[in-house]
């Protein structure tokens, strides 16, 4: 039973865009008894007026529109406590759909975040909450407003320190010039904003030890940081009803096809593994950067540009291994989804996963093609090991459900509220 004091604790959670973590955070706090409100750009109510309008569309268009809208909803969130500020998010979506990328898109995201953050700051000043929770890149002004009203200011840092990521990007531009365009960049004013957020909040949520270490390395006090791994829907993401074929070796990657995700190193590994029987590499996600970077590997993979989030679970059931050699993450959702689906996972420490080396899969160093090849060859050679890791993967996921996540978040918030700030 939730602590009745939570019902008297008003929490504002704000995020400018579409983010399933933010949805689970606010929905989880509501489920745990907090008076939690969600302020965002756009959130879809499947029982609201827009849903009724969508139902009037022709069937084909209705399916297309519904797929997009389902990315912006979560059944756990009480829609009566959602407040929307859509203009900045609409501007970002238009820019992204128009193909804007690189630093130009980063500036649009910065503009969107700035407007939403200032909007939230006004709300905090006019309706003072007990807690304000923002997300990295869009939490500075609301945090400052929170200080003025005596609120606990929490930053949900969902990825490693921005400057650490930019450092890796500069290194990759030299190591792999063809993929350089796919690496992130940010103007200095956004970098400064991220620095200020880390200083001007009382407490910081991070999803992995990797993120924690990148913050501490740049001067953030360890005492401010709490590591709470994410969760996964273990009912939706689950192993297939029938065992996977032992003579097939289907490798799956899901995410933006960029060098930040280590895709160039994965393709190099695939080139060296092409002799393996039954091998198939499936890359799912939007290509980021120049097509020329992928051209030398065109015959090595099957490309699936886009699968709606509510349909992606079928991909994991139809694969044998998730390979995710990311260079810079927070805690990649796909690794949790793979575990829940009973997939061994080959990934890096920088992916921030809950995978344990040699138990549910393998952890390899970033940029290490030799290590990728070695672990994948072993998994191909030892189907019994794959089967054992598959069972272990599912068991591991059961410790990281969204219900467990929300209990951990609520307990951490209770602890912070009992500590003077």
Image (cartoon, rainbow, N blue to C red):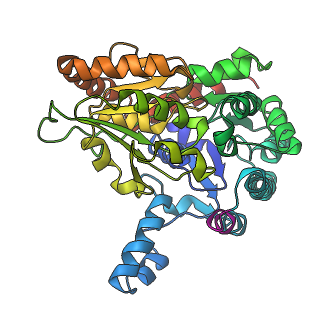
Residue 329: horizontal and vertical position, in percent? 59, 32
Indicate yes or no whether the magenta region holds residue 262: no
Image-based side of 220 in relation to 256, left or right = right
Q: Camera-side residue: 276 or 237?
A: 276
Q: Camera-side residue: 153 or 52?
A: 52
- In the displayed orientation, state which residue is furthest to the left: 242
Q: Is residue 55 visible?
A: yes
The stretch of residues the image draws in magenta is 93-99
Task: Look at 45% across and 16% down and name the residue there.
Answer: 371
Q: Where, quadrant-wise, is the C terminus in this rendering?
A: top right
Q: Camera-side residue: 311 or 151?
A: 311
Task: Look at 73% across and 30% down and name the residue there.
Answer: 174
Residue 210: horizontal and vertical position, in percent? 60, 21
**For residue 221, above or below residue 12:** above
Residue 161: horizontal and vertical position, in percent? 71, 29
Q: Where, quadrant-wise, is the N terminus in this rendering?
A: top left
**For residue 81, above or below residue 172:** below
Q: Camera-side residue: 348 or 299?
A: 299
Task: Look at 13% across and 35% down and name the residue there.
Answer: 243
Tell me which corner region of the image, top left, top right, bottom left or bottom right, holds residue 151: top right
Q: Is residue 360 visible?
A: no
**For residue 294, above or below residue 206:** below
Tell me which corner region of the image, top left, top right, bottom left or bottom right, holds residue 214: top right
Task: Please identify the dominant SS of the magenta region.
Answer: helix
């Amino acid at each position: 039973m939730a602590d009745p004091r939570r019902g008297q604790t008003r929490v504002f959670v704000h995020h400018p865009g579409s983010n399933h973590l933010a949805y689970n955070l606010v929905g989880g706090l509501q489920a745990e008894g907090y008076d939690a409100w969600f302020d965002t750009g756009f959130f879809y109510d499947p029982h609201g007026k827009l849903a009724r309008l969508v139902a009037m569309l022709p069937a084909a268009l209705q399916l297309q529109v519904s797929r997009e809208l389902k990315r912006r909803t979560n059944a756990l969130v009480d829609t009566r406590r959602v407040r929307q500020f859509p203009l900045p998010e609409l501007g970002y979506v238009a820019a992204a759909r128009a193909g804007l990328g690189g630093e130009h898109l980063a500036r649009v995201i910065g503009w969107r975040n700035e407007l939403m953050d200032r909007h939230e700051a006004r709300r905090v000043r006019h309706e003072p909450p007990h807690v304000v929770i923002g997300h990295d890149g869009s939490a500075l002004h609301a945090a400052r407003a929170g200080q003025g009203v005596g609120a606990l200011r929490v930053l949900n840092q969902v990825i490693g320190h921005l400057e650490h990521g930019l450092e890796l990007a500069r290194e990759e531009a030299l190591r792999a010039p063809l993929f350089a365009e796919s690496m992130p960049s940010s103007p200095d004013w956004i970098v400064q904003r991220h620095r200020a957020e880390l200083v001007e909040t009382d407490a910081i949520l991070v999803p992995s030890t990797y993120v924690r270490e990148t913050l501490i390395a740049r001067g953030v006090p360890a005492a401010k940081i709490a590591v709470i791994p994410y969760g996964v829907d273990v009912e939706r993401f689950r192993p297939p009803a029938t065992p996977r074929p032992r003579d097939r070796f289907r490798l799956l990657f899901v995410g933006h096809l960029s060098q930040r995700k280590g895709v160039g190193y994965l393709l190099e590994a695939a080139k060296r593994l092409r002799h393996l029987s039954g091998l198939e590499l499936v890359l799912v996600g939007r290509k980021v950067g120049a097509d020329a970077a992928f051209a030398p590997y065109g015959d090595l993979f099957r490309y699936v540009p886009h699968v709606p989030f509510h349909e992606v679970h079928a991909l994991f059931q139809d694969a044998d291994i998730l390979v995710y050699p990311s260079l810079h993450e927070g805690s990649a959702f796909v690794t949790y989804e793979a575990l829940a689906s009973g997939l061994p996972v080959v990934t890096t420490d920088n992916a921030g996963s809950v995978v344990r080396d040699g138990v549910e899969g393998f952890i390899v160093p970033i940029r290490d093609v030799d290590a990728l090849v070695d672990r994948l060859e072993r998994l191909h050679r030892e189907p019994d090991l794959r089967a054992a890791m598959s069972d272990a993967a599912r068991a591991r996921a059961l410790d990281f459900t969204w219900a467990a996540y929300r209990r951990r978040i609520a307990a951490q918030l209770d602890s912070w509220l009992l500590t003077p700030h």
